[in-house]
């Protein structure tokens, strides 16, 4: 709390960009972060898992220096994330049961954990452009991937 107060007194403006499902900018977790969507709920669960190790190192009272600015809002990023989680689970299942390379569905790891700089750039560009048709195309692709993944279970 003292650091945050000192930081905010010294630095006039700070932005903290986050992609919805990226855990990195939310670490260490802060219990006062609001839950506004499915990703927030997922991150809250992660914070409960990390609670004991953080307490051992004195990190349980961590506070971010500013509020987050989430770049990827809406159902599109959630659909993409969960469809790719399902595709990854399907790939793992087929590899374990068939001992194959899992050539069927391919999970996009960047959609599962969107931490790479190009993902931030893409989401920032989409936010600045107001979403547009690219988001609709991505939503349709995600829905198709989710349907294919569900059919393989």
Image (cartoon, grey):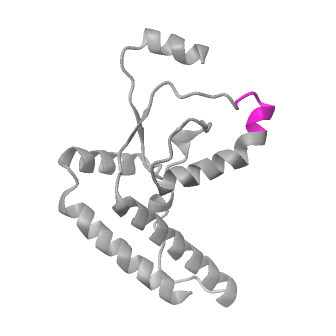
Quadrant where the C terminus sits is bottom right
Q: Residue at x 51, y 49 (%)?
A: 40
Query: In this view of the protein, can residue 104 be seen by the observer?
Result: no
As rendered, which of 6 and 32 lies closer to the eye?
Answer: 32
Q: Is residue 122 left or right of residue 33?
A: left
Instruction: Please give the count of numbered marks on the rendered protein.
Output: 0
Query: In this view of the protein, can residue 116 be seen by the observer?
Result: yes
Within the magenta stretch, is there residue 88? no
Q: Residue at x 55, y 47 (%)?
A: 23
Q: Position of residue 105 (x, y in %)?
A: 47, 80
As rendered, which of 108 and 7 lies closer to the eye?
Answer: 7
Q: Position of residue 147 (x, y in %)?
A: 42, 82
Q: Residue at x 41, y 67 (%)?
A: 79
Q: Is residue 112 above or below residue 143?
A: above
Q: Position of residue 67 (x, y in %)?
A: 44, 31
Q: Is residue 11 above or below residue 77?
A: above
Q: Quadrant of residue 102?
A: bottom right
Quadrant where the N terminus sits is top right
Q: Is residue 52 above or below residue 119?
A: above
Q: Is residue 108 left or right of residue 2?
A: left
Within the magenta stretch, is there residue 57? yes
The magenta stretch spans which residues?
53-59
Q: Is residue 139 above or below residue 17?
A: below
Q: Is residue 42 left or right of residue 106?
A: right
């Amino acid at each position: 709390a003292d650091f945050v107060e000192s930081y905010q007194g010294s630095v006039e403006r700070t932005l903290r960009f986050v992609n919805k499902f990226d855990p990195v900018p939310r670490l260490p977790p802060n219990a006062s972060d609001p839950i506004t969507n499915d990703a927030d709920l997922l991150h809250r669960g992660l914070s409960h898992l990390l609670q004991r190790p953080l307490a051992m190192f004195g990190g349980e009272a961590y506070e971010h220096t500013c509020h987050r600015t989430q770049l990827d809002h809406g159902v599109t990023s959630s659909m993409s994330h969960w469809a790719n989680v399902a595709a990854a689970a399907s790939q793992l299942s087929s590899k374990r049961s068939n001992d194959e390379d899992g050539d069927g569905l391919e999970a996009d790891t960047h959609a599962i954990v969107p931490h790479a700089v190009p993902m931030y750039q893409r989401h920032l560009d989409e936010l600045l452009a107001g979403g547009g048709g690219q988001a609709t195309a991505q939503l349709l692709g995600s829905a198709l991937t989710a349907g294919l993944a569900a059919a393989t279970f």
